[in-house]
């Protein structure tokens, strides 16, 4: 009633592939790689795109963006452009932008350019602003540690949830 139909003569033409390699979507397609809640991965993850972790990862993660879900656990170092943390990370986080939700728990240092922390987030470690180091520099060895809470020079170290 609402569509036009074409008359086809004979059988449809067979489609022949022009390449034996499957087509892959570009890294910036907007669809993240998802580690679901029932999945446990032991090993490092590296992606030029987005990763969403809802399960358990034991290893380092290097990606453009990372979302750590509320029930997720990561044991390893994080190196990304942007990180949103709602779950637990046991390891250092190095990113241009870090957002910690109220359910976030980080045991390790956070090295950032921009940091947002919701009331109730838990941090045990140092917080340091990124000083000209890129995320691809391979770890935090070229960054001096931030002073501890007992120091008078403004470092930040806590072992309890942040109050509002």
Image: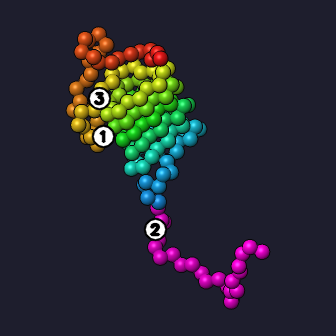
Is residue 27 rendered to the left or right of residue 56? left
* Front position in the image: 149 or 119: 119
Give the residue number, with chain letter if any, for mark 3: 129
Residue under label 2, please give it: 21
Determine crowd level at label 2: few under 14, some 14-19, many 20+ residues with C-alpha closer than 10 A: few
* Residue 79, magenta (yes or no): no
Residue segment shown in magenta: 1-24
- Of labels 3 and 1, earlier in sequence is 3
Q: Nearer the viewer, mark 3 or mark 1?
A: 3
Residue 2 is covered by the magenta coloring: yes
Disc 1 crowd, CA 10 A, few/some/many (<14, 14-19, 20+)? many
Q: Secondary structure at mark 1?
A: helix
Task: Name the spot of residue 79 as percent of width and height, x first.
Answer: 35, 38
Q: Secondary structure at mark 3?
A: strand
In the image, residue 154 lies at what x, y percent? Answer: 27, 17
Q: CA distance from mark 1 to mark 2?
A: 32 Å
The numbered dot on residue 135 is 1
Magenta span main SS: loop
**How many angstroms separate mark 3 from mark 1 (CA)?**
13 Å
């Amino acid at each position: 009633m609402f569509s036009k139909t074409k008359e086809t003569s004979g059988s449809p033409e067979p489609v022949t592939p022009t390449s034996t390699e499957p087509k892959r979507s570009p890294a910036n397609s907007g669809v993240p790689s998802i580690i679901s809640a029932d999945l446990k991965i032991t090993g490092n993850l590296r992606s030029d795109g987005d990763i969403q972790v809802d399960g358990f990862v034991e290893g380092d993660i290097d990606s453009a963006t990372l979302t750590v879900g509320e029930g997720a656990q990561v044991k390893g170092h994080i190196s990304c452009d942007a990180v949103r943390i709602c779950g637990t990370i046991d390891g250092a986080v190095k990113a241009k932008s870090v957002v910690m939700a109220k359910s976030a728990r980080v045991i390790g240092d956070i090295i950032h350019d921009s940091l947002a922390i919701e009331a109730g987030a838990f941090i045990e470690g140092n917080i340091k602003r990124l000083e000209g180091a890129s995320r691809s520099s391979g770890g935090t060895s070229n960054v001096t540690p931030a002073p501890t809470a007992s120091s008078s020079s403004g470092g930040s170290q806590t072992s309890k949830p942040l109050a509002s």
